[in-house]
Image (cartoon, rainbow, N blue to C red):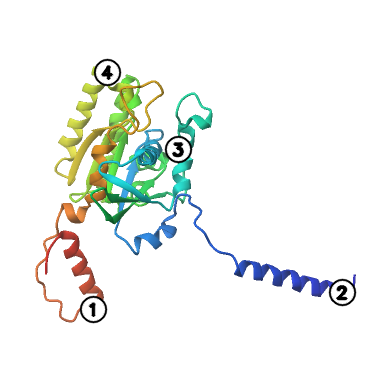
Amino acid sequence: MSKELEETQEVDIDDGVEAEDDSLIDFYSGDALSVEESRSISMSSRVQLILLAGAVDCGKSSLIASLFHCFQNGPLGGYLFAGSRTLVGFERRCHKARVASNRDTPTMDRTSFGEKRKLLHLKVAQKTNPSTPKHLFFADVSGESFEDAINSVDDCAQVPLLRRSDHFVLLVDGSKMIDLAFRQNAKKEALLLLQSCIESNRLGERSLVDVIFSKYDLFVHDDTALNFIESIKSAIKDRFGDLLGRIRFSNIAAIPETGTKAIKLGYGLNEIFPSWVEDNPGSYFPIELNNENLEGCCEFDYFGRNYARRESGINE
């Protein structure tokens, strides 16, 4: 083959690749979003960010999967499913809990440490007012990140999306409540994680905190476990009641074990979910704004002031 022909073919191949790249259309993968990918939604709409926190296997991914299952069966907490950019991401978290996975018991994949695609998108609309949908992001951060945060305030400050979250949802593994060998450590981890979040200034007096005891189906009839949970609640309220804006406690059974007939899939989510849609620190703790003199300020200052007023329900 002549040198001239080789050069011609090489140019033709390069040109063909460039032309093919220029014609590609970038579709959404449907998988969980990175922070960068989420900006097309967050820059155009008010988004509620719910950060799910807790140790490995505490039930964070199961909670997300359960939400997806519940909406397939109808409204949840008075809200209708109105769309999602991350249906594939939800489906990945649901598959192993289904009969089609050929597993004997429901299970979930762990969120990988260092995973950049952390955000699951959900758009919902109030059943009584479906014309005004709202957007939510559920941040599925690995349990290893929170285990590091327990041991180091500096590591806690690095937990993705913690400062930005509208709702901090701490899951305590309910399976450890029925095991004498693990329950004290689970209590200690919950207290230390909250302490680390406060000391790193990631949680404070305007924070909305939910402490959720997962896997309720495992301890619903265990009085010893239920009493121990009450001791955890008391310890959290005594230590952090004056430091956090709102603390609530709930029991959930996101995906009950097979054969648990009395506890339905998604038990407890009906009561919690509406506040994740409706409440945020700006609305729950209105900011007191005076009619300060903005003379000499730029347009951005006006925008920031007016946005804060709208979020706080203050009329001009």
Spatial distance from mark 2 to mark 3, Cα to Cα? 57 Å
Spatial distance from mark 1 to mark 2, Cα to Cα? 64 Å
In front of the other: label 4 or label 1?
Answer: 4
Residue 297 position within the rendered picture, expressed as x and y whole percent measured from the top left: 20, 78
Spatial distance from mark 4 to mark 3, Cα to Cα? 28 Å
Spatial distance from mark 4 to mark 1, Cα to Cα? 61 Å
Q: Earlier in the sequence, mark 1 or mark 2?
A: 2
> Residue 10 or 274: which is nearer the viewer?
274
183, above or below 25, in the image: above
User: Which quarter of the figure has residue 192?
Assistant: top left
Q: Which mark is residue 94?
A: 3
Check disc 3 and report its element: helix, strand or loop: helix
User: Dot 1 surroundings within 10 Å: few (below 14), some, or many (20 or more)?
Assistant: few
Q: Earlier in the sequence, mark 4 or mark 2?
A: 2
Q: Which mark is residue 298?
A: 1
Q: Residue at x 60, y 68 (%)?
A: 23
In front of the other: label 4 or label 3?
Answer: 3
Identity, as a three-letter code, of the amino acid under mark 3? Cys
Q: Which residue is mark 2?
A: 3
Q: Earlier in the sequence, mark 3 or mark 1?
A: 3
Identity, as a three-letter code, of the amino acid under mark 1? Cys
> Residue 150 or 44: which is nearer the viewer?
44
Specify the farthest residue to the bottom.
296
Q: Which mark is residue 222?
A: 4
Side of 33 relative to 178 (left or right): right
